Image (tube, grey):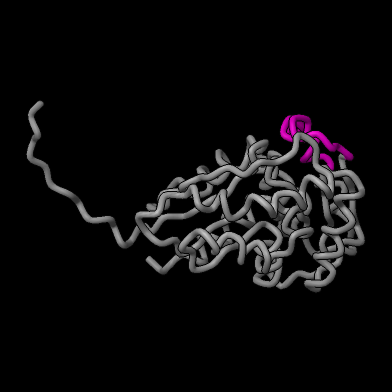
Amino acid sequence: MTVLPHTFEPDDPAAPPIGLIALQTDETIEPELQRYFRDHPSPIYVSRIPSGAEVTPESLAAMAAHLAASADLLPKARPYPVVAYGCTSASSIIGSERVEALVRQRCDARVVTNPLRATVACAAAHGVSRLALLSPYIEEVNRPLRDAFLRAGLTTDVFGTFGEAEEAKVVRISTASVVDAGIALGSDPTVDALFMSCTNLRTYAAIPRIAERIGKPVFSSNQALAWHVERLLPAR
């Protein structure tokens, strides 16, 4: 064996890493975030967290026991300006502050965000407070999410759901169905904006089509998360 000479290159300080903790069952968040950050220099490092095949309050709450371990699996060579936990409904049940505390137990993260926290920040930046909410979830999951938004000052009186519990079905809801449902809810004159919940729901292609039709801001879990992460990164 010949040991060959080599040199090392320093990490680019203008491209700090982004951490993402994605659900084991999520097939959407990674490709969508890669599209949102396709022109950004920061790499996205992903860890997975065990999650149930069905979305229930119990399966969501159970993720709290795995958050620290999942954060521990992110590469440790550099600190993270921001780590994103990719579950809207679990964040409403576990709580954003507890999510952050658990992630930071085992990961050098300056700040931790999630789709719930990100959507509240996104709505504030757009000056909206009356959301139409499109959800794929069953009612037992919808209720704590709507309550969490209300505590943050966001109403969701206009609300519709696909009523699916299985993650494998949620991810395969067609873009056409998302667009039709989003237009129907977002067109209500009493709302300021539309929010489409769930990181596993495919919304990337639907957002511009809905926004064009309703003439209002349209947010989704992945879109809001990407928006918030980018603003939490150091200025380039």
Closer-to-camera residue (213/95) = 95
Q: Is residue 102 left or right of residue 180?
A: left
Indicate the position of residue 151 as horizontal and vertical percent values. Answer: 82, 72
**Quarter of the figure with residue 205:** top right
Closer-to-camera residue (184/13) = 13
- Report the quarter where the N terminus lies: top left
> Residue drawn 70% across and 49% down?
63
Closer-to-camera residue (60/129) = 60
Instruction: Say whether residue 220 is visible.
Output: no
> Residue drawn 56% across and 49% down?
70
Count the marks: 0
Q: Is residue 188 left or right of residue 51?
A: right
What residue range appears in magenta?
163-181
Instruction: Say whether residue 163 is visible.
Output: yes
Indicate the position of residue 152 as horizontal and vertical percent values. Answer: 78, 72
Identity of the residue furthest to the top in this view: 1
**Quarter of the figure with residue 176:** top right
> Residue drawn 81% across and 69% down?
154
- Is residue 164 rendered magenta in the image? yes
Residue 200 vs 159, above or below: the answer is above
Q: Is residue 180 left or right of residue 110?
A: right
- Is residue 13 rendered magenta in the image? no
Closer-to-camera residue (212/71) = 71
Residue 223 vs 124, above or below: the answer is above
> Residue drawn 36% across and 58% down?
78
Indicate the position of residue 14 as horizontal and vertical percent values. Answer: 33, 61
